[in-house]
Image (cartoon, rainbow, N blue to C red):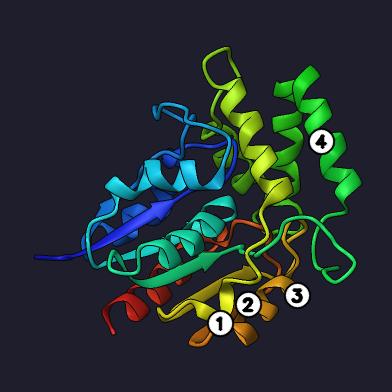
């Protein structure tokens, strides 16, 4: 039986964003690609991190390798601490323990930037999502292709999904996982783009230094979604780490 690999996507998208990576990994692993709450086909839940994690937990087989990107990486860290029997290893892509800046955390977006983004999403959600896609692909050598895949994978901000998407932005504004990071017992592989404008590479470097067992790979000329622009390289690293 092949090993279970669970892929958690980022805010505003759906599990279809994993298709390029999944095409490379599917022959090696049993893949699980749940949508985040209120994204894609998943039902919305409440606005708290615990509620989102509780909704995802039944989709994670015992002993799985958990791959999380962006908000999905924050959820993966939380789940690894909450249910260590379910998660044997972590792969964190474009990860940060905290999305917004604080006096002791400069490696993030300014709080005012995210506040304005949340306000824009309330009034013009579709345009705001398009700007978010542009920001995620910025600085990547394959910018156009990355942006196109991200745009095709967006969860529509319609009446069914808009509230949950707004809750997700609230999570990005509130989550601070720095206190739990030193207690993560699983081995961790960090993959990050050198030009990531959402979660600066300094955040991944902090994670690599603070996690008890972690290794970081930084992809040059790459933005927030290296698993799209460098899918084969990411797949090779994930496979080697997961099966080691």
Relative side of 233 to 118, left or right: left
Query: Image quadrant of residue 181?
Result: bottom right
The residue at which mark 1 appears reads as 211
* Viewer-nearest residue: 141 or 89: 89
- Between the C-alphas of marks 4 and 3, the distance is 23 Å
Give the percent coordinates (x, y) of residue 81.
44, 67
Q: Earlier in the sequence, mark 2 or mark 4?
A: 4
The residue at which mark 4 appears reads as 117
- Give SS at disc 4: helix
Query: Dots 1 and 2: beta carbons under 8 Å?
Result: yes
- Between the C-alphas of marks 1 and 2, the distance is 6 Å
- Between the C-alphas of marks 3 and 1, the distance is 14 Å
Q: Which of marks 3 and 2 is nearer the N terminus?
A: 3
Compared to 19, does 166 lie above or below? above
- Between the C-alphas of marks 2 and 4, the distance is 26 Å
The residue at which mark 2 appears reads as 207
Which residue occupies 54% across, 21% down? 161
Give the percent coordinates (x, y) of residue 232.
43, 66
Which circle, 3 or 1, is nearer the viewer? 1
Relative side of 140 to 235, left or right: right
Query: Image quadrant of residue 156?
Result: top right
Quadrant showing the N terminus? bottom left
Relative side of 146 to 45, left or right: right
Query: Dots 2 and 4: beta carbons under 8 Å?
Result: no
- Give SS at disc 3: helix
Which circle, 3 or 2, is nearer the viewer? 2
- Give SS at disc 2: helix
Which residue occupies 66% across, 30% down? 166
So how many labels did they put on this image?
Answer: 4
């Amino acid at each position: 039986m092949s090993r279970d690999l669970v892929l958690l996507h980022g805010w505003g998208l759906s599990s279809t964003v994993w298709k390029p990576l999944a095409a490379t990994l599917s022959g090696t692993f049993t893949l699980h690609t749940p949508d985040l709450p209120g994204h894609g086909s998943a039902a919305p839940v409440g606005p708290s991190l615990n509620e989102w994690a509780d909704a995802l937990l039944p989709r994670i087989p015992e002993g799985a390798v958990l791959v999380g990107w962006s908000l999905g990486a924050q959820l993966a860290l939380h789940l690894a601490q909450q249910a260590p029997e379910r998660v044997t290893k972590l792969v964190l892509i474009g990860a940060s323990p905290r999305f917004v800046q604080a006096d002791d955390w400069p490696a993030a977006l300014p709080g005012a930037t995210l506040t304005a983004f949340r306000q824009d999403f309330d009034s013009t959600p579709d345009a705001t999502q398009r700007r978010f896609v542009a920001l995620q692909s910025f600085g990547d050598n394959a910018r156009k292709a990355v942006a196109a895949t991200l745009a095709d994978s967006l969860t529509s901000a319609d009446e069914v999904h808009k509230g949950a998407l707004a809750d997700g932005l609230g999570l990005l504004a509130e989550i601070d996982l720095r206190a739990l990071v030193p207690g993560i017992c699983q081995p961790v592989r960090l993959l990050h783009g050198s030009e990531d404008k959402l979660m600066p590479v300094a955040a991944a470097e902090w994670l690599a230094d603070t996690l008890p067992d972690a290794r970081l790979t930084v992809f040059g000329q790459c933005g927030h979604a290296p698993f799209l622009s460098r899918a084969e390289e990411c797949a090779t690293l994930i496979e080697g780490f997961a099966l080691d």
